[in-house]
Amino acid sequence: MCPWYTVGGKVSDKNLEQRINIQFCVKIGKGAREKLAILTEAYGEYALKKSSVFEWHRRFKEGQEYVQDDPRSGQLQTKRNDANVDRIRTLVRSDRRFGVGVIAEELNMNRETVRQIVKEDLGIRKIPQKWCLES
C-alpha cells in the first residue's frame, strides 16, 4: 500500500487531489466514465474506485462545492456529561442505598455509564448498604 493513500483513516492528499480533478472535469463537461479513465491512467492502482468516481461526479453535478467527506456521526454520544453527573450525585445523596441498576433505571441511563460516573467522576465506591467517598 502506498504511504499517502490513507493516513490514520483520514482522506489522503491524493484522494482530495482526485476529487478536485473530478470537480474540475464536471465544470468543463467531462463525463464520469471519461474521468474514471483519466484518473486510472494518472494514479494507477491508487486511483479512486469506479463507485467513488461516479458518486463524486454526481455530487459535483448536483452543485456540491466542497471536496471533503460528509461529516459522520462517529461514536455515539455519551450521556456522561456534567448535567448527568449532577443528577446522579443528587440521587446518591438522597438515598445512599441506591445501586447502579436503580440509578440507571431511575434516570433512564445505561448502567455502564452510571457506573463510570459513580466511580470515575464522583469518586464513590459501593460498600454494602451505603456509598462511601474514596479517600
Image (cartoon, grey):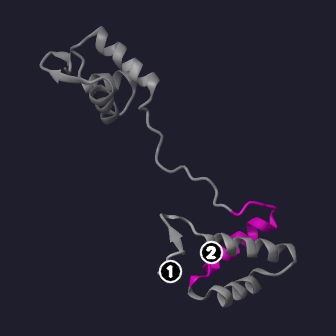
> Mark 2 and mark 1 in contact (Cβ < 8 Å)?
yes
Whether residue 41 sits left or right of residue 6 in the image: it is right
Q: Residue 58 appears in which quarter of the rendering?
A: bottom right
Q: In the structure shown, which secondary structural element does the residue marked by tag 2 occupy?
A: helix
Query: Residue pushed farthest right?
Result: 28
Q: Earlier in the sequence, mark 1 or mark 2?
A: 1
Task: Please give the name of the residue rendered at 81% of the width and 68% of the height, measured from the top-left corner.
Answer: 61
Residue tagged 1: 2
Q: In the structure shown, which secondary structural element does the residue marked by tag 1 occupy?
A: loop
The question of residue 89 being in magenta is answered with: no
Q: Which corner quadrant holds the C terminus?
A: top left
The amino acid type, in three-letter code, at marker 1 is Cys
Which residues are the magenta region? 46-67
Whether residue 98 sits left or right of residue 31 in the image: it is left
Indicate the position of residue 45 as horizontal and vertical percent values. Answer: 56, 87
Query: Residue pushed farthest bottom?
Result: 41
Indicate the position of residue 26 as horizontal and vertical percent values. Answer: 82, 74
Q: Residues within 10 Å of mark 2 (few under 14, many from 20)?
A: some
Indicate the position of residue 120 as horizontal and vertical percent values. Answer: 30, 30
Task: Please give the name of the residue rendered at 78% of the width and 71% of the height, measured from the top-left corner.
Answer: 23
The amino acid type, in three-letter code, at marker 2 is Lys
Residue 114 is labelled as none
User: Rounded to the nearest whole Å, what is the CA distance between mark 1 and mark 2?
Assistant: 10 Å
Indicate the position of residue 62 as horizontal and vertical percent values. Answer: 80, 63
Task: Please give the name of the residue rendered at 20% of the width and 24% of the height, measured from the top-left corner.
Answer: 125
Classify 44 as above or below 76: below
Residue tagged 2: 14
Classify 92 as above or below 67: above
Whether residue 43 sits left or right of residue 108 in the image: it is right
Query: Residue pushed farthest left?
Result: 128
